[in-house]
Image (tube, rainbow, N blue to C red):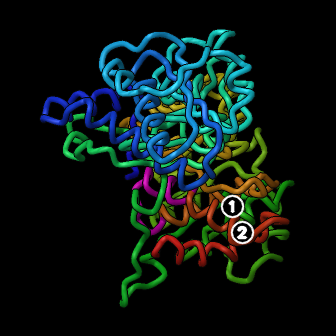
Amino acid sequence: MNELLTPEETAAADRAAVAAGVPVAALMHNAGRAVARAVAARFRPCRTLVLCGPGNNGGDGYVTARLLAERGWPVTVAALAPPRGDAAAAAAGWHGPMVPFAPAEAARAGLVIDAVFGAGLLRDLSPEVIAVLQAAPRLVAIDVPSGLDGATGAVRGFAPRAMLTVTFFRRKPGHLLLPGRSLCGDVVLADIGLPATVLPGIACRTFANTPALWRLPALAADGHKYGRGHVTVLGGATMTGAARLAAIAARRTGAGLVTIAATGSADIYRTGDPGLMVDAAPVPTQLADPRRTIWVAGPGLGIATAAEILPALLASGRQIVVDADGLTARTGHPEHLRGATVLTPHAGEFARVFGAPGPDRLAAVRAAANITAAVVLLKGADTIIAAPDGRVAINANAPPWLATAGAGDILAGIIAGLLAQGMPAFEAAAAGAWLHGQAATIAGPGLIAEDLPCAVPRAFAAAGG
């Protein structure tokens, strides 16, 4: 279930299911039952207040209230407004106590279930709703915490922090994108009877990044180093450690050969790992070798050097991972990055090249991929990988201790190593992001960038590679 559906796509799935003969009442009952089961599995019975909005999210809340009451829980319901449409039938099945939609009622409850608004809310919450949600001592959200944009993970003015969120059929981008992910708590994905046959008609283009989304390179019994590709990393004259980190990551990822193309003195690079090749010839001379198909340009390269070398490199027809100084050298001119294969900016570099992404980062990264005709990987705790054809993967396995100097250089090298072994660009970038996060998890707190390459083989094993 890697598909991530926007609220609009989820609504389309609901309509397709109803058109196929699945009753709305059955979907709402199954949703409420899933919430009641999840709540009963995680909490002891306590005074519970269900906050119900007027739409179908509120309808799910009325069903949840009824089923929890049938389990013996002391439940009350507070309605923001009278139910409408399909939610009215669900509300008619609730015969328990109703209380005012007020902060005092939320404060005296042991548990509050937020069924006010779902993921498709298009406006900021009102002060009345915010005050009630803020008063909740513990909160469970149905679909998403009210105020959270399910498409972008952005908060519309305010959204409460839930201990548990129960959603249905498929998760939404907002469950993985920050700040939404930090507000959802534990996310339970429940089957409510929507058939998977509705998915082809939706043509989903957004996915959770897991090993189910790609396949790592398989090693042939009769393979050899030349068959596993040759990665060249441009090495700068001063910040030499960055290129060396990218190079060792490419080697650990499985590239058959890795060379540093030294743009300054090669001596510092020659004192490094004995298996790393160093070439001090001019870059145009090195480009003449047709076997040098994968290049990494940017880590520690220097902005001026990157600006000088990139035009010929981008015009060479090679596969190029552009990072760090290679991106900054094109500040304000993303069109000058056409010819690259994968771009790996962090938030600051992205803003310099493409402009501030705004609240809808998925749309911004998709647009960047379209402009450059490259796969764009926006690094962060919720890394976004976009292909020029519109596909997007959201990576959410990176632990907080991965935020350390040099980690981005390692990621560029991992992606290059996967490209060298024949992975398509989008899959190589997505797999690289996942392996990067998994390696950091394996290495554990206290991580420094040098720890990551040694953990990459175990990350491969965790991915089934």
The residue at 75%/66% (across/down) is 244
In this rendering, is residue 433 above or below 441? above
In this rendering, is residue 115 above or below 433? above
| Label 2, residues with CA under 10 Å away: few <14, some 14-19, many ≥20 | many
The residue at 53%/78% (across/down) is 461
The residue at 70%/64% (across/down) is 440
| Residue placed most toward the observer, 359 or 86 | 86
Q: Main secondary structure of the magenta part?
A: helix
CB atoms of marks 2 and 1 within 8 Å: yes
In this rendering, is residue 11 above or below 292? above
Residue 93 visible in rendering: yes
Which amino acid type corresponds to the residue marked 1 in the rendered image?
Answer: Ile
9 sits to left or right of 334: left
In the rendered image, which quarter is residue 47 located in? top right
> Where residue 200 sits: x, y (%)?
21, 41
The residue identified by callout 1 is 410
| Residue placed most toward the observer, 436 or 258 | 436
> Where residue 391 sits: x, y (%)?
39, 40
The residue identified by callout 2 is 452
- CA gap, disc 2 to disc 1? 7 Å
| Label 1, residues with CA under 10 Å away: few <14, some 14-19, many ≥20 | many
Residue 425 within the magenta-colored segment of the rendering: yes
Which amino acid type corresponds to the residue marked 2 in the rendered image?
Answer: Leu
Disc 2, SS: helix
